[in-house]
Image (cartoon, rainbow, N blue to C red):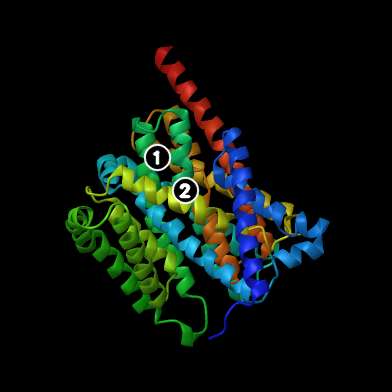
Amino acid sequence: MEKLQHIEIIVLLLQLATMLVVARIFAEIARSLKQPAVVGEILAGVLLGPTLFGTIAPDYFFMLFPPSGSSAMVLDGFIQVAVVLLLFIAGLEVDLHIVWQQGRQALLVSLFSMILPFGLGFLASYFMPGLFNIADGDRIIFALFIGTILSVTALPVIARILMDLGIFKTNIGMLIIASAMIIDILAWLVFSVILSLMGSEGEKMNIQTTIGLTLGFTLFMLTVGRWLINFSLPWINKKLSWPGGLLSLSLALCFAAAAFTEYIGIHAIFGAFIIGVALGDSEHLSERAKEIIHQFINNIFAPLFFVSIGLYINVFESFVLLPILVLLITAYVGKIGGATLGARLGRLPKYDALAVGFGMNTHGTLEVILAAIALNNEIISEEIFVSVLVVVMITILTSAPLMKYCLKLAKEKETG
């Protein structure tokens, strides 16, 4: 069995130490500026990568982060595990009871805030392939990806923004959360189908089989599987040491589901996400247990992934203004317009509906993960990847103040 050499072990450990320390520093800076930690962690990766560190001290950069070799391969393994765990805790945040309670309004907001940006993103990228430097043969898959990216709402980020604004428990807050949950599930189904279209014929199942197994797995886990988990948790909490037993079995279930969905031709992250939904919906999974899982993953594995985003991309070299502007305009018009329309059809007042629209236009963790997977699968180029990062950053920075302004106008109208 091939093993890491002495120097490769040292390099790997220094990589992990450097990534975690720098990520923590910039995450704390981001929090001090009232921004999500993910913003600081992505910035840390940009600074550690060829954009800054690789430009200032290229020899030391390639010594610490070699592009190939055993240490690079092991680090990539850590990153893959981090992505799977990130989607697992994203699934834990999906509360199906909240979705059912919001009912018709959440369905209208989620459908319109997904369909309109998806359609605009698809049309813009499909009919302007030259702008995005896409070959004719890749146009459909690329257009599907852009539509999906623009239609997703970042549930973890918008949840934090709603808490900061003090409206998480209000009707508007719950409506945004429920709508984002519905979109998450639908978007992952769509993206899983996109990934199943990739690769050679020998590497993938028949597309009908893949879609059938994907839908079957989803329905099973959200019904029978969810019931089995809920039935088993009291025994696990009582008989096994807490929280070690719950933590190890939860992660084992996450990895098993991820392996299954990877096997049937869709990405491992989908299995992890659905298992997270099924587990997080159990009444026997306490908030304390959720917090332990979140802290473990968010502070150890999540920074590794978000820092890795910038390690091998020179942002300055890959920054192209026109695609960024097109994606930004499409995102704002499609997402805000669609969500606002859905909220108005759900009989929300004008300014409340606009606040919902600005909230639903929050992009973040999931979009970055989707873009990173698409980049690895050569669906998109580095230029488009950087464009997605810019869109994510700008929507995060603008969502809270725009929502706050609309809620202020709504309150003034009520009191006036």
Helix, strand or loop at disc 2?
A: loop
The image shows residue 11, relative to residue 86, as above or below, that is below
Q: Amino acid at mark 1?
A: Ile
The one nearer the camera, 371 or 4, is 4
Upstream in the sequence, badge 1 or badge 2? Answer: 2
Q: Position of residue 157 (x, y in %)?
A: 49, 43
Q: Is residue 111 visible?
A: no
Location of the C terminus (image quadrant): top left
Please identify the residue farthest to the top as the structure is shown: 416
Q: Amino acid at mark 2?
A: Thr
**Label 1–label 2 contact, CB within 8 A:** yes
The image shows residue 41, relative to residue 16, as above or below, that is above
Mark 2, residue position: 153
Q: Position of residue 243 (x, y in %)?
A: 31, 52
Q: Position of residue 251 (x, y in %)?
A: 36, 62
Q: Is residue 374 visible?
A: yes
Judge the density around disc 1: few (<14), some (14-19), many (≥20) Cα neighbours within 10 Å: many
Residue at 19% over, 61% down = 228
Helix, strand or loop at disc 1?
A: helix
Q: Quadrant of residue 314?
A: bottom right
Q: Quadrant of residue 25?
A: top right
- Please tell me the numbered disc located at residue 176: 1
Residue at 38% over, 57% down = 186
Q: Position of residue 268 (x, y in %)?
A: 43, 68
170 to the left or right of 282: right
Mark 1 and mark 2: span between their CA atoms? 9 Å
Judge the density around disc 2: few (<14), some (14-19), many (≥20) Cα neighbours within 10 Å: many
- Please tell me the numbered disc located at residue 389: none
Residue at 59% over, 33% down = 32
Residue at 59% over, 43% down = 27
